[in-house]
Amino acid sequence: MARMNTPRAVLTLVLLMGAMVVSGVAAAATAPRNVIILFADGIGTAHVEIARLYNRHIHNAGLTITDVIMRQGSLGLMTSHPVEAIATDSAAAGSAMFTGIKTTIGTISMTPDGKPARTVAEAARAAGKRVGIVTTATVYDASPAAFSVHAKSRRDTQAIVDQYLTLGLDVILGGGRDFFLPTGTGEGNRKDGKDLIAAFRGQGYSYAATLPELKAATAKKLLGLFAWGGMAFEIDRDPAVEPSIRDMTEAALRTLAQDSPNGFVVLLETENTDTAAHRNDIAALVHAVREFDAAVKIAYDFYSRAPNETLLIVTSDHETGGLTVTYAQTEMTTSGSKRFYAAPEHLKLVSGITVSLDKARDILGKKPDPAALDALVRKHFPGFTLDADLREAILGQKMLERNCTYPTQCALGRMVARQTGIYWGTSGHSAQPVFVAAVGPGSDRFQGYMDNTEFGKALLGLLDAR
């Protein structure tokens, strides 16, 4: 290698070294102390817009997601496809977002050739940060699992829970008590006879099973399991039994902010948006988005107290349901029937629905009775009329299409669609890009059109730069 001993060569080397130092300082300066990821599983821009319009026309209120985060911060669009397909599942999408590596459907933060990929939770731990996961799903569901640990299959639920204990997450809140307790204990599903709740308590965690216990928790580590399986839809939730995503967000931020000299990273997920969209349930969806937005407001208030320290991201992993607001015909007759356009009065109709479509299915049972079906529509869907073809589909438990796999829910969802203009294209995931909205240090890295692996790399880059 030639020696650089001329004045010009020496000056060039000094300038290059100086630029590298300055670049490193700048990266550290833009790296957030805290990262709050608010994650509404399965929502796209249409889901947010229908909730915004619902809030405006029904409650005369705004939406923090659109009116504050999107307006003030950076805004981007993100793709969601996995390695082998166009439409994804939550495991592959979450894995790409939280490792920066694209993988296959059903895989939890493993490369396509089966090697563990470093997760955001692991990177945060290495940076000395406190880490939490919050979800209305089971805590071992695909998104929180991909954020944290590794599994060849999202179905390896017992192993996922075991890894949470090993990793030492500071906050775990959600449903999924079944895989923390052995078979024979309530609805416990563990096959090894272990009591993981006791194991977490043994490592200094407070344990909460109800909303009052959650509010009373003061320890620096917190485990909260509020249902044996996933938690209830907001439209059905009994607040005396289960907290909401807003309640859990408040508790998580309060807990993680304690004794955190290096800050924290937390994933705050509502799964209810995804499940409602799978069921083509617009009423459950808007209730879920509104409660999620209340959680966003709590997080934004936390951010506002120290805006130079906290990065706040609001996003999703994929779109579910192919939701759109359109016009429809007033009658199922010839083309001579009148057309109507979705309008505020149709949102008013939606606001009168009093149960989720899943609960409606549970009320009717596996063999719906005609009289019970008519009574259910009158009581819980005031103003709606069940067309004959949809009534037949429910009574006979027949699928409407190949991409609408829940006979009762899809038929009731189609009833609502025909009379409001709020239609669903599928009961599965779509390939539509999802939004990423962010405020705070590093938020500029999430603007523009990006792949979900680029989201992961940007997030990991900020954690590594601190």
Image (cartoon, helix red, strand yellow):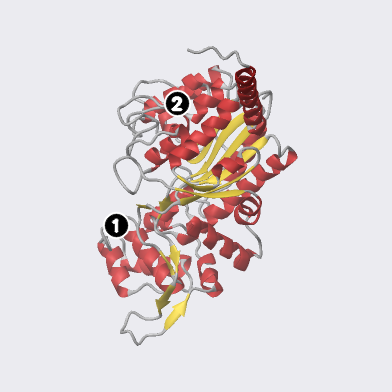
Quarter residue 110 falls in:
top left
Residue kind at label 2, given as amino acid type = Arg
- Total marks shown come to 2
**Residue that label 2 marks:** 118
Tell me if residue 57 comes above or below residue 125 in the rendering. Answer: below
Q: Is residue 390 left or right of residue 297?
A: left
Left or right of residue 396: residue 321: right
Within 10 Å of disc 1 (Cα), the crowding (few <14, some 14-19, many 20+) is some
x, y (%) of residue 457?
49, 34
Labels 2 and 1: the sequence-earlier one: 2
Figure check: 44 above or below 443:
below
Q: CA distance from mark 2 to mark 1?
A: 35 Å
Residue at x-position 59% and y-position 27%: 465
Does dot 2 land on a helix, a strand or a loop?
Answer: loop
Residue pictured at 45% horizontal, 57% vertical: 356
299, 21: nearer the viewer:
21
Residue type highlighted by circle 1: Asn
Q: Nearer the viewer, residue 197 or 320?
A: 320
Q: Which mark is residue 403?
A: 1
Coordinates of residue 283 in the picture (x, y in percent): 49, 61
Give the x, y percent position of residue 81: 37, 45
Image quarter where the C terminus lies is top right
